[in-house]
Image (spheres, grey):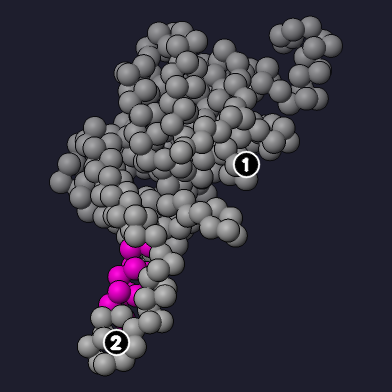
Amino acid sequence: MSERGFFFDLTDQLENNSNIHRQLLQKIEATTGRNLICYLANASHPAGAMQDHDPDFLENLLRSIDLDRYGRKLDVLVNSPGGFPYAAGKMVKVCRTFSTEFRAIVLGRALSAATLLCLGARELLMSETASLGPTDPQMLMRSPKGDRLVPAHVIIQSFGEMLGAAQKAIAAGQPPDPFFHVLDSLDVTAVFESSKALSSTNVIAKDLLKDGLLRATPERIDTAVKALITEGEKELHGKHLYPDILQNQIGLPVSVLKVGSDADLKLRELFVRAEAYLNNKGIAKYFLSSAGGLDINVQLRRA
């Protein structure tokens, strides 16, 4: 059925723009009986990480739609490489404030801080090939060669190993200068900040699970949080945690979308179209609701 007339409908299809995405989203809502919004981030964009202003965009998006239409039940389709843990915590707060039931949906990847966002949901729905990631925090390290993200535990461990090696050299009557040289190159404040980041992420994850995915089984929270952090420490921060791993090794409840199911096909079409739009336009993030889409290309810098 024509939405805006033949010419404009054809243009929308050819451009794969937000009008097409909005129509697909509305069809999914009519099927599920739940409000649906999308939070999709471009991992290759400098501003693609989850940042402090994202919760504000999310709240403005939720204020622009009639949530009562579906009893204030909310689905959030998430795809993000992660970012600031506190931003994830506030996004959960926003979702809970504007809904009676908040469900996270992951068809691609929701890593790091985006994993924290999922932990705060009442339910987690994932495709069979989707993944969350370890929640060990990453620290921004600046150098003449450029900025890069380094796992907090690596910074702490590196400092501890060099300090221990210097102490052993002194005790053995050997020159500790090589180790002191390495220690001089390490930012001591980064070590303390890394330690605080690990502690803060631990607290945030537990708080989110308490009223989120593990609200019915609080005795499992400590074990799950420890597992999510150590998965990054013992292997790689970018490790993919698929639904079976999350259920059997981490202890998180996950509802799995079966490949080829009606919900899988409809959500997948929306996801693929929206991802193509995001990447082709080279934007940082794409917020989408039944009212329309919001392109984000801003990056707020921290001092």
Point 81% across, 18% down: residue:
11
Q: Residue 260 at what x, y percent from top left?
A: 57, 40
Location of residue 41 with respect to 200 vertically, above or below:
above
Which residue position holds label 2? 169
Q: What stretch is highlighted in magenta?
A: 155-165
Q: Furthest residue to the right?
A: 7
Point 37% across, 12% down: residue:
71
Point 28% across, 45% down: residue:
200
Rendered image quadrant of residue 19: top right
Q: How far apart are marks 1 and 2 (CA)?
A: 45 Å
The answer to whether one can see residue 255 in this image is no
Q: Residue 170 at what x, y percent from top left?
A: 26, 86
- Per the image, label 2 sits on a secondary structure element best described as helix
Residue 158 magenta-highlighted: yes
Question: Is residue 276 rendered to the left or right of residue 35?
Answer: right
Q: Residue 140 at what x, y percent from top left?
A: 46, 51
Amino acid type at mark 2: Ala
Point 38% across, 51% down: residue:
137
Q: Which of marks 1 and 2 is nearer the N terminus?
A: 1
Question: Is residue 37 rendered to the left or right of residue 212?
Answer: right
Which residue position holds label 1? 45
- Per the image, label 1 sits on a secondary structure element best described as loop
Question: Is residue 261 rendered to the left or right of residue 21?
Answer: left
Location of residue 294 with respect to 169 vertically, above or below:
above
Q: Quadrant of the N terminus?
A: top right
* Label 2: how many Cα within 10 Å (few below 14, some 14–19, many 20+): some
Amino acid type at mark 1: His
The answer to whether one can see residue 147 in this image is yes
Residue 11 magenta-highlighted: no
